[in-house]
């Protein structure tokens, strides 16, 4: 079985059976392929009798969402498993356990998180997660600080950056997020009703300038080891637990890209609340919850990151230089806001959308949600370098909803 080929369900069972300490001898295992993402196969293997289960995630040699015409490296499976192991070390309890990585079959065997729900689905059901901001801010502060030049040996960091060179997956981001939405591209995909918005994205010079600056940072700034695709479809939640999955886009990049991904995806749900909330009162209430969550994520991240800096910093100059920490955090906030905006725009007009918006059944309501999302996204991109607090993002969201009477 060791030569690469996409597994059948029965092969996935045989592979899972060989993982020590999970299934009882002779267990009757069942298997279902449950992958709903854009890229990979995900097998769920379970023993009904003991209730034990695990996940086998296997990379395909192409992007599943497009097909074999878009070849994609299998090495992303190594990057994903190594990133999960790093994240688990730095943020214990916030990622699934990795049982095995098989380089020949390009697969990772990991903990089954089916007792959680994908956060995007939870948000579409207007559920609240009181510990999420605490958990995700810990994940972000720990993984970003301790893989940066502030928190780890600077020579080791360069060596580690070499293990996370991820050109093909970075190219997807560079094209889909920072290029296609602002030009005519066969990758783009949007409803005809918002052709005026797509045209405006293609002709807005101030927007292009800001996107170019953010893209330049994505291309050149190896600040920390990023998750690289931290949207709400890559986060499993329960009221009492948060688990981050799917770091196959991991590479050394600008920290704000991860923080912005979380914020941008919460705001995409905010835009979609026209449909998911039952009425005006619950819409207002849930939107406030989303904005409080955005604020709390940034505030807690800022506090935790500064605490690491003050207590665990390994860069002597960073410890001494007056005003450096405040300047660093201000730039980080601004990057996060800018990238949040980019993440929002791409999910409305680019290749891969989000269910928060696309599953709105009524075309007129969906169109309004798309316009709100684009209005917020553009405001965040254009205003990022002037933002002095996270309230800038919150005010932009409120303004867009009010302007379009969401
Ligand atoms: N550890 C896990 N436990 C349970 N389900 C999982 C796990 N990992 C992935 N899944 C399921 O598979 C889906 C796709 O996984 P994901 O890692 O996002 O794949 P892709 O890389 O193709 O986007 C998830 O939305 C989730 O339903
Ligand atoms: C051609 S890949 C498009 C899109 O899919 C990835 O998301 P996921 O693997 O979580 O489904 C990533 O966001 C890419 O930009």
Image (cartoon, grey):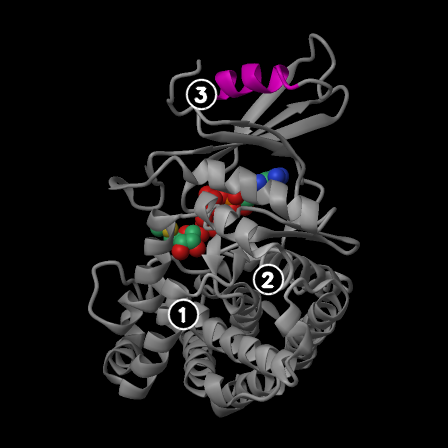
Q: Horizontal placement of 315 versus 164: left or right?
A: right
- The quarter of the picture where residue 224 lies is bottom right
Q: Does the magenta stretch include residue 38?
A: no
Residue under numbered circle 3: 8
Residue at 56%, 83% (x, y): give it.
Answer: 393
**Mark in front: 2 vs 3:** 3
Q: Could you tell me residue 293's position as x and y percent?
A: 68, 72
Gap between marks 1 and 2, in whole Å?
32 Å
Name the residue that disc number 1 marks. Answer: 217
SS state under label 3: loop
Pointers 3 and 1 in contact (C-beta within 8 Å)? no
Q: In this view, does 110 lie above or below 280?
A: above
Give the distance between the C-alpha atoms of the residues marked 2 and 3, in whole angstroms: 32 Å
- Residue at the location (55% across, 83% down)? 397
Q: Nearer the viewer, mark 1 or mark 2?
A: 1
> Where in the image, quadrant-wise, is ligand 1 located?
top right
**Mark 2 crowdedness (10 Å alpha carbons): few <14, some 14-19, many ≥20:** some
* Mark 2 element type: helix
* Residue stretch in magenta: 9-19
Residue 308 at x, y percent in the picture: 73, 65
Mark 3, ligand 1, within 8 Å: the answer is: no
Q: At which x and y percent is residue 220?
A: 38, 65
Image position of 22 with respect to 314: above or below: above
- Counting residues from the N terminus, which is met first, the one under dot 2 or under dot 3? 3
Q: In this view, does 175 lie above or below 65?
A: below
Q: Nearer the viewer, mark 3 or mark 1?
A: 1
Q: Mark 2 points at which residue?
A: 124
Q: Determine the image quadrant of residue 52.
A: top right
Would residue 374 be found to the left or right of residue 331 on screen?
left
Q: Disc 1 or 2, which lies upstream in sequence? A: 2
């Amino acid at each position: 079985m060791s030569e690469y080929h996409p597994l059948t369900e029965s092969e996935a069972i045989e592979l899972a059976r060989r993982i020590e300490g999970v299934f009882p001898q002779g267990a009757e295992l069942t298997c279902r392929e449950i992958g709903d993402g854009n890229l990979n196969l995900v097998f769920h293997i379970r023993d009904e009798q003991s209730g034990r289960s695990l996940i086998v995630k296997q990379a395909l040699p192409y992007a599943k969402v497009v097909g074999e015409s878009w070849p994609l490296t299998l090495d992303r499976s190594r990057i994903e498993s190594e990133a999960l192991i790093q994240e688990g070390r730095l943020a214990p309890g916030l990622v699934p356990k990795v049982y095995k990585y098989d380089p020949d079959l390009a697969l990772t065997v990991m903990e089954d998180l089916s007792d959680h729900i994908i956060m995007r689905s939870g948000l579409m059901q207007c559920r609240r997660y009181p510990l999420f901001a605490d958990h995700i801010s810990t994940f972000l502060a720990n993984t970003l600080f301790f893989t940066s030049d502030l928190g780890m040996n600077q020579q080791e960091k360069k060596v580690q950056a070499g293990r996370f060179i991820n050109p093909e997956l970075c190219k997807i981001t560079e094209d889909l997020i920072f290029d296609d939405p602002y030009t005519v591209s066969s990758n783009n995909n949007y409803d005809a009703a918002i052709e005026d918005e797509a045209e405006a994205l293609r002709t807005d010079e101030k927007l292009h300038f800001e996107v170019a600056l953010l893209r330049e940072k994505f291309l050149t700034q190896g600040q920390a080891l990023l998750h690289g695709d931290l949207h709400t479809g890559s986060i499993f939640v329960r009221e009492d637990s948060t688990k981050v999955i799917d770091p196959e886009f991991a590479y050394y990049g600008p920290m704000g890209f991860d923080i912005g991904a979380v914020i941008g995806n919460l705001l995409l749900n905010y835009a979609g609340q026209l449909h998911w909330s039952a009425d005006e009162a619950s819409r207002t209430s849930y939107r406030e919850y989303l904005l409080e969550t955005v604020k709390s994520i940034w505030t807690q991240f800022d506090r935790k990151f500064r605490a690491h800096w003050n207590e665990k910093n390994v860069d002597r100059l960073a410890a001494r230089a007056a005003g450096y920490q405040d300047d660093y955090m201000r730039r980080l906030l601004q990057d996060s806001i800018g990238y949040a905006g980019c993440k929002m725009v791409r999910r409305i007009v680019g290749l891969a959308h989000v269910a928060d918006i696309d599953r709105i059944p009524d075309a007129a309501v969906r169109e309004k949600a798309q316009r709100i999302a684009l209005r917020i996204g553009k405001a965040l991109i254009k205003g990022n370098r002037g933002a002095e607090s996270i309230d800038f993002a919150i005010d932009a969201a409120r303004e867009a909803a009010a302007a379009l009477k969401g």
